[in-house]
Structure formats: structure tokens, C-alpha cells
Amino acid sequence: MTTESLVLEIKKKQSFLCIGLDVDLDKIPKHLLQEEDPIFAFNKAIIDATHHLAVAYKPNTAFYEAYGIKGWMSLEKTIAYLNSNYPEIFTIADAKRGDIGNTSKMYAKAFFEDLGFDSVTVAPYMGKDSVEPFLSFKDKHTILLALTSNQGAFDFQTKKVNGDALYNEVLRTSKTWENAKNLMYVIGATKAEYLSKIREIIPDSFLLVPGVGAQGGNLKDVCKYGMTKNVGLLINSSRGIIYASSEKDFAKAAAGKAKELQSQMQQILSK
Ligand SMILES: O=c1ccn([C@@H]2O[C@H](COP(=O)(O)O)[C@@H](O)[C@H]2O)c(=O)[nH]1
């Protein structure tokens, strides 16, 4: 999907909500465990109930890999379902990959060609040759971890390198890479106070912002400091939406939580 199509969808739905599909079999409603593929049954119900309120879905691959081959098949079915039924939705494989060049090329093929995701999250730590293989795919997006939402972000990402924080160095240097137009960045919602400076370095790039809801990040602060003329934000919520209820009404309850966030977004966009 092109960035232009994503922006059009955001304006149409008045939403920049990304729903995280982090499916844990211990947390989904018990009646679904009788289904042939409980993970897919759960995802399908959540997607069908919320697709009009969200512009993106983000399965975190860890939650599928944890269930072995069956989990990977549930992931395949989920992305195929999204691509066939809701092609206007932006899809994110939260896989946090990145390796030497020839290995990264295979990761990129797996997520972009085989599975058909629009984007994948990638760690920048191994540098340019580990990221460029992802960037070479037309209309696919590489979402680079810059300043993450967790406490451990302060272990390395905010440490000074060449007089500035390492995450700023990641932002600045990655802009010089081939096909850098295909880059987006992860900035945690819990780090909203860093966004003004971040926008000085990457004024127009899309940011994937996890950490609202369960992790305590604040939507209004993120928008105040991080929003661009094209919105430039995808705000992710996973547990706060998909586990709104563990009863038979789980999909309706998820839609209720998604609606709360979408209404706040609509209000922000109308200003
Ligand atoms: O900095 C980061 C990068 C990725 N994540 C992922 O986003 C979701 C957040 O889930 P919630 O349930 O809404 O807290 C999850 O998949 C994380 O692995 C992140 O939280 N922070």
C-alpha cells in the first residue's frame, strides 16, 4: 500500500487507530477453544467488528510463533483474510527482524512476498546493510525501532553518541539510506515528550506509536507533539482493545473500546 492510500483511509475513517492482534490462548474466551483454529476465529471476529474504526492491524509475530506451526498458519490465515476482505487496511507484521544483508533479504521476502504484509518492524542495531534489503520493496514499508515504549529504552536508545541520543542518530542516519522514503519509525507513546525534537529530524515520516492503554501512554500528548499535516501517526492498542471482554460479547466489547479511541481521534482531527 502507498503512503498516500493510507492517508486517504485515515481521512475517510477519521481514525489513525492500529489494532494489535496479540492473541494469547489463555486470554481469549473459552468457547473459542473448541474451534478448529481458535486464534484465527478470534482474529476474524475482532477484525469484522472493528474494521470500520481502524486503519491498520498489527499482529505481533511472537504470539503466533509461540504456538509453532499451528500459530504460523493462524498468522497466514489472518493476513490472507485481511488482504482479501479489507484491502484498504494497512497491515503490520510486528516481527522486529534485521540481520546481515542476505538474511534480511529472506526476512523481507517472507513478510512482504509470501505473507503479503504492507510493512514489517525492523531493529536498526545491525545498520544500513541489514535494513536496505527491506527498503528495496516497492510500496512496502519498513518500520524502524527508534525510541521504544519500554523502560529498557533508556539502557541504550537515549545514551549519547556523537553528542546526541542514539535514537536521534538512528533517525538521522537512516534518512540517508537508499529508498529511505519507505521508512516509518516506532516511537513509544510513553515517550511523547521526545516527539517535538523527533519531528525536527523526521518532520513527515509516519510513526507507529505503541503504548497507549495498557502501558499508560497518552493519546492527546502524542498527537500534540507528533502529528503532521498528513497525520503521520498510527496509534496502536492491543490488549486494551482485544481483551475488553473474555466472554461471548468479546468482539462487541472490542469494538466499544476501539470506538472510544476513534472518537477521540476524530475530535483531534476536527480541530
Ligand atoms: O516500543 C514498542 C514496540 C512494540 N511494542 C509492541 O506493541 C504492542 C503493544 O501492546 P499493548 O497491549 O497495547 O501494550 C505489543 O505487541 C508490543 O510488543 C511495544 O509495546 N512497544
Image (cartoon, rainbow, N blue to C red):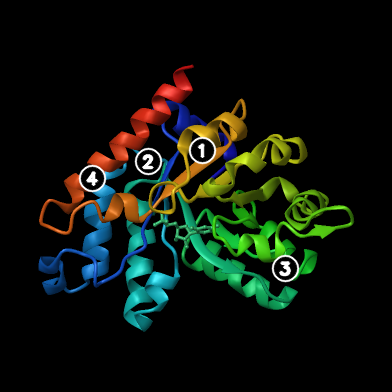
Density class for disc 4 (Cα within 10 Å; few <14, some 14-19, many ≥20) is: some
Residue 7 x %, y %? 53, 33
Residue 223 x %, y %? 54, 32
Give the residue type at disc 4: Ala
Does the rendering let one see residue 172? yes
Residue 68 x %, y %? 37, 83
**Which circle's residue, 1 or 3, is located before the other in the chain?**
1
Residue at 29% in and 35% down: 259
Density class for disc 2 (Cα within 10 Å; few <14, some 14-19, many ≥20) is: many
Residue 225 x %, y %? 61, 32
Q: Are marks 2 and 4 in contact (CB under 8 Å)?
A: no
Q: Which residue is mark 1?
A: 6
Measure how far apart labels 4 and 1 are at the Cα level.
20 Å
Is ligand 1 closer than 8 angstroms to the Cβ of mark 4?
no
Residue at 65% in and 65% down: 123
Which mark is drawn over residue 49? 4
Nearest to viewer (mark 2 / mark 1): 2
Residue sitting nearer the eye, 198 or 217: 217
Density class for disc 1 (Cα within 10 Å; few <14, some 14-19, many ≥20) is: some
Which mark is drawn over residue 125? 3
Horizontal side, residue 81 vs residue 128: left or right: left
Horizontal side, residue 223 vs residue 247: left or right: right
**Which circle's residue, 2 or 4, is located before the other in the chain?**
4
Q: Which residue is mark 2?
A: 54
Give the residue type at disc 1: Leu
Measure how far apart labels 3 and 2 are at the Cα level.
31 Å
View extreme (bottom): residue = 68
Horizontal side, residue 27 vs residue 94: left or right: left
